[in-house]
Every structure is written in C-alpha cells, then in structure tokens.
Image (cartoon, rainbow, N blue to C red):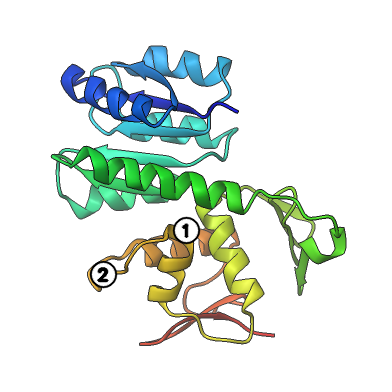
Amino acid sequence: MSINILVVDDEKEIADLIEVYLKNENYTVYKFYSAKEALHCISMEKLDLAILDVMLPDTDGFAICQKIREKFHFPIIMLTAKDEEIDKITGLTLGADDYITKPFRPLELIARVKAQLRRFTKYNQQDTEEDENIIAISGLILDLNTRKCQLNEKALSLTPTEFSILRFLCVNRGRVVSSEELFKEVWGEKYLSSNNTVMVHIRHLREKMSESAENPKYIKTVWGVGYTIEK
C-alpha cells in the first residue's frame, strides 16, 4: 500500500530535494510551495505524514499544523530555518510530532520520517483480543485499537505522539519512567539532555486533560527522575 506524504515548503530547491529523497523510498509525494494548495490537498487526499515549513508566503506552517489536527492524527514534522526554542515549542504545542532545523541532511530527514511512520503504524495495529486493548485507570480510558481516549466520559483529541506517551505511561503505571526512556520508546532516537520535547508534550497532555502541573491527578512528575501514573 502506498504511503502518501505531504511536503510544503516555499523554497523550491528544498521542496524538490525532499521530494527526490522521499520518492527514492517509494513514497508518494504531494508537494506544494504555498499553504493554499496544501490545505486543499489535505481535504482531498488520504495522507500518512506531513512535512511543513514554518515560514510560508501566504501563512505559516503552524496554521497548517493546527488545521490538520482539527481532523487528522497522522504524524507532522516541522521544518524551521531558525534554531529558536520558541518555534519548536510552538510547533509541538500545536500538535507537531517532531521538528528539524534547516539546513539539514536529507538522510536525517528520511530517518525521522521512517521513525514517525514506524511508530504510527506500530500503535495503530489491531490485536484480536479487544479486552487486552482497553486501558482503564480512574476514569481515563484508552482504546488501543481505535487510538481513542476518554477522560470521565469526555473524548480527548490527542495527537499520535501524545497518545503514544500516555499509552506508555499507562502500560507502565506504578513505575517512574524517565524522559530518556519515553523519548527512546516514542521517538525511537537517542535522548539528549538539552532536549525538552518530552516536557513540552507532557505539558500539552496535562492541558488537554485539564490537569494542574502543581497537583496532577494522573501524570505526576518525580523531579530529577521522570514521570509516572500511579496504580
């Protein structure tokens, strides 16, 4: 089955280069240099992943990311020309799963794409035993088959990364999971001490769950160690 990837970048040379490398991996590429055409594609085509440049002539990649997350859960990788923490945090907060700073090595981007697709596929595989795919903890219910989450009978709209983090914490409830372990499990890459990706996603998860960072009911921080969901 063909894997469809959206590429949006107003720098033609970069967009064309990304397209070449993706096609070499036998991915189907929908390439656009502006947001307007990309948004039309999102509504018409079944996509498996999006690569979005932050700076675009008619809007920005954040707006496209936000629009995608209104309906879809496929992975999003943001491209930014500026190595600024605020850009990364903004993208992750709006639902992006990963980011990469320009200039980048095309093979690194392809590795990130493959990692996101592997993770998304892994956590969307259905098992035969339905009861083994339902996690319920004090009003929090995760359906691993449908990747749907409810909290006190209210549906939570989670990105694939958020769902994967919450799932891993729930499966390991009662145990403190370090940021390094979470990052390796969800992103499939080596964790760097300067990387605050996990922290941003945990904060966003808590916001969606209406959790207080100071006194959370579900995702608790064990300072200097990691995160845990108590039994």
- Counting residues from the start of the chain, the first of labels 2 and 1 encountered is 2
* Quarter of the C terminus within the rendering: bottom right
Q: Is residue 85 left or right of residue 210?
A: left
The quadrant in which residue 13 appears is top left
Where is residue 218? Give x, y as percent. 62, 75
Instruction: Decide: few, some or many residues near mark 2? Use Cα within 10 Å; few <14, some 14-19, many ≥20.
Output: few
Where is residue 53? Give x, y as percent. 28, 31
Residue at x 19%, y 25% (from the top left corner): 14
Where is residue 55? Give x, y as percent. 23, 29
Residue at x 39%, y 13% (from the top left corner): 36
User: In the rendering, which numbered label is found on residue 192?
Assistant: 2
Helix, strand or loop at label 2? It is: loop
* Quarter of the N terminus within the rendering: top right
Residue at x 20%, y 17% (from the top left corner): 12
For the question of whether residue 130 can be seen, the reply is yes
Q: Is residue 184 left or right of residue 142?
A: left
Q: Which residue is mark 1?
A: 204
Helix, strand or loop at label 1? It is: helix
Give the alpha-carbon distance from disc 2 to disc 1, as whole Å.
20 Å
What kind of residue is marked 2? Leu
Where is residue 205? Give x, y as percent. 52, 60
Looking at the picture, does residue 12 appear above or below residue 108? above
Residue closest to the eye, 17 or 100:
17
Residue closest to the eye, 210 or 95:
95
Residue closest to the eye, 48 or 203:
48
